[in-house]
Amino acid sequence: MARVLVTGGAGYIGSHTMVELLAAGHEVVCLDNFCNSSPEAVERVQAITGRPVRLFTGDVRDRSLLDALFRAAPVDSVIHYAALKAVGESVARPLAYYENNLAGTLTLLQAMDAAQVRRIVFSSSATVYGAPQRLPIAEDAPLAPFNPYGHSKAMVEQVLRDWCAAAVAAGRPAAAVALRYFNPVGAHPSGRIGEDPAGTPSNLFPFITQVAVGRRAELAVFGNDWPTEDGTGVRDYLHVVDLARGHVRALDWLVAHGGFVAINLGTGRGISVLQMVQAFERATGVRVPYRVVARRPGDIAACWADPALAQRLLGWQATHTLEQMCDSGWRWQQANPDGYRSQAARPGR
Ligand code: NAD
Ligand code: UD1
């Protein structure tokens, strides 16, 4: 049993990971400033699992809060999700992204050093590879991010590599796993927690579910002239519950190993935009009207993972089907048409 601090635990991936951690018997402490999430998510994680989460409301950049947290709620490992994640916004507000994602991680690592906690799982992203030179993408592919968000993830990976090397050289074992996620979608099968984007979703899957539920008229498909099978963009979509379980496996790796490793989490299978629309329609019986528009600036044609290292080091592989991704995402969207705000407005709950 581990005692785990989950930063950004109220967010989309963090909330699903807290469920899997609690289900595996671990104790969970959550730190979140709710800049992109709701405390309701933490309530629901506790309702789903019937187990408590110790919640600290605050910012990962707040060193004195972190010191107090490590004193009040001793943990042996950290899963670090707290970050800003909108690619377009990162181009407009680079300093906010470097401050939150990079400086926030530096503060966290300094506080971890002081508390002698030297195990961390970090949320990296397939975005660190930029436009891939070869598919599927393995971990030794060159890193070539092309926006501040992607740079912030690659920079943190380098910080973690150096932090581990220094600690190990000084005889203080440290271990860090950077998990490079491909495209997480779907929701917990209960439909009680899920992705709750603020404003207009920039990612494909939540846009599809919002069209299906009637919040938006149609999906804009960003180009059908890509060099792919049907001309639309291809990505490696993986179920968020599989992703969450990958973090639990990474925690086990941390306990048994030292040093830094970066690992892809993906299915190894590419799905086009139109294939995703069709899969969603098949799984839910709901039509998703769409219109093809111009390509989105900064997009790439295709991207999918070589997931072999995750299988070899963590014994992890994705098990959920595309149908389960669509079905669970739809269940969450239907039950919560306005995300966590839907429930808050409902009396008597
Ligand atoms: P999310 O926005 O739902 O979750 C992030 C959480 O961190 C939110 O609850 C937010 O309130 C919190 N947070 C942000 N800054 C904070 C700060 N300074 N202090 C305390 N809390 C803070 O995002 P998500 O989709 O769950 O992503 C989690 C992590 O995974 C992020 O690091 C993201 O960059 C990374 N990631 C996400 C995806 C994806 O497609 N969702 C893909 C690759 C990587
Ligand atoms: C985006 C981010 C990436 C991040 C990833 C997971 C950009 C440029 N990249 O990547 O950094 O790691 O999300 O969060 O934002 N599409 C449409 N219509 C839409 C939305 C998307 O056709 O309304 C298409 C896209 O062109 C793409 C595919 O759907 O071909 C998937 O898009 P998206 O969900 O945004 O994921 P990524 O492009 O992989």
Image (cartoon, rainbow, N blue to C red):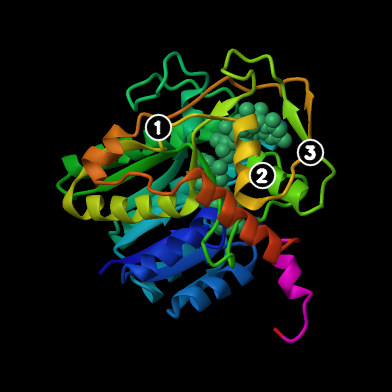
Q: Is residue 42 above or below residue 260?
A: below
User: How many numbered marks have been drawn onto this rendered protein structure?
Assistant: 3
Q: Residue at x 42, y 79 (%)?
A: 51
Q: Amino acid at mark 1?
A: Gly
Rendered location of residue 78, percent (x, y): 37, 57
Give the image quadrant in which the ligand numbered 2 is located. Answer: top right
* Residue numbers of the magenta segment: 339-348
Are the residues tagged 1 and 3 within 8 Å (C-beta)? no
Are the residues tagged 2 and 3 within 8 Å (C-beta)? no
Q: Separation of disc 2 and disc 3 at Cα?
A: 10 Å
- In this figure, which residue is indicated by the disc labeled 1? 268
Secondary element at tag 1 = loop
In magenta stretch: residue 212? no
Label 2 neighbour load within 10 Å: few <14, some 14-19, many 20+: some
- In this figure, which residue is indicated by the disc labeled 2? 281
Return the residue nearer the eye: 325 or 154. Answer: 325
Task: Say which of marks 2 and 1 sits in front.
Answer: 2
Rendered location of residue 148, percent (x, y): 59, 30
Q: Is residue 90 above or below residue 42?
A: above
